[in-house]
Image (cartoon, rainbow, N blue to C red):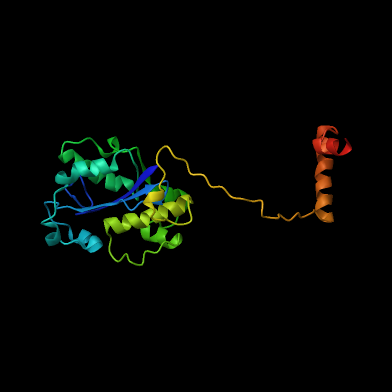
């Protein structure tokens, strides 16, 4: 399955209030492995970021002035995301901004272009009720190294979230960039292990365990009218 871990940075908190996306970071997973085929853009939002937002992402208005507008890259973005399962932390926030940007260029809402959206914040709240479930908190809890995260950045946050998601879903030991080994849609992954060289130890039950087992069989005899399969097999 092809999955895209996605994150955005914005000029503020309200898409409906006119705030815009200034950065988009996407990390591709195939068969739950990093492929290295990522997508990363900065955008000219045609407005300035709120002061509080600047403190979060540190992306200056001056830096964004010569960047392309979202409309110029919308087709490329949708082609990259097409039919993938999208993984977002606090999905409602990012999707609301993506919907508004797509609306501005006459496109359908975001979910029309992807196979589905997984919200890792909702997953975390279910897995760790009553605990802090920010991306930083999950990195600490799941032992994901976020020491390079001094400010929010869409691509860095997407990379961290990819690692967090794999740890949350216990799919593999580590993320390995190996695009050449990614299976095609028609391939299956099979692992063959030769166990013929291993001598498995046989551990016999001790007297206490045998007595406990016999007691269980006695109780089964009483409830089954003497028809316990184990007893019948022993007497055959």
Where is residue 110, by image quadrant?
top left
Is residue 129 in view?
no
Is residue 102 in view?
yes
Quick check: 162 left or right of 225?
Answer: left
Q: Is residue 194 above or below residue 152?
A: above
Quick check: 76 left or right of 138?
Answer: left
User: Which of 97 and 165 lies nearest the eye of the viewer?
Assistant: 165
Q: Quadrant of the C terminus?
A: top right
**Residue beneath the point at 47% across and 41% down:** 188
Outermost residue on the right side: it is: 235
Q: Quadrant of the N terminus?
A: top left
**Residue beneath the point at 17% across and 58% down:** 50
Q: Is residue 192 above or below residue 144?
A: above
Residue 217 locus on image (x, y percent): 82, 42
User: Which of 197 and 89 lies nearest the eye of the viewer?
Assistant: 197
Residue 166 locus on image (x, y percent): 43, 52
User: Which of 231 and 82 lies nearest the eye of the viewer?
Assistant: 82
Marks counted in the figure total 0
Residue 11 locus on image (x, y percent): 19, 54
Residue 198 locus on image (x, y percent): 67, 55
Quick check: 16 left or right of 178?
Answer: left
**Residue beneath the point at 27% across and 64% down:** 151
């Amino acid at each position: 399955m092809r999955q895209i871990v996605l994150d955005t940075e914005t000029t503020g908190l309200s898409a409906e209030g006119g705030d815009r996306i200034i950065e988009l970071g996407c990390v591709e997973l195939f068969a739950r492995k990093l492929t290295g085929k990522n997508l990363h853009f900065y955008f000219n939002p045609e407005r300035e970021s709120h002061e509080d937002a600047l403190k979060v992402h540190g992306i200056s208005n001056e830096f964004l002035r010569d960047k392309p507008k979202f409309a110029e890259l919308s087709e490329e973005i949708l082609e990259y995301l097409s039919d993938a399962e999208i993984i977002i932390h606090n999905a409602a926030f990012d999707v609301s901004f993506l919907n508004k940007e797509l609306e501005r260029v006459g496109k359908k809402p975001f979910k029309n272009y992807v196979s589905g959206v997984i919200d890792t914040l909702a997953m975390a709240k279910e897995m760790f009720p009553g605990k802090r479930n920010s991306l930083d908190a999950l990195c600490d809890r799941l032992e994901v190294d976020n020491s390079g995260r001094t400010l929010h950045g869409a691509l860095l946050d997407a990379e961290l979230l990819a690692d967090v998601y794999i740890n949350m879903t216990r799919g593999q030991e580590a993320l390995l960039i190996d695009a050449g080994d990614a299976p095609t849609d028609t391939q299956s992954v099979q692992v063959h292990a030769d166990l013929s060289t291993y001598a498995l130890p046989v551990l016999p039950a001790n007297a206490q365990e045998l007595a406990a087992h016999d007691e269980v069989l006695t109780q089964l005899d009483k409830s089954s009218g003497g028809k316990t399969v184990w007893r019948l097999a022993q007497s055959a």
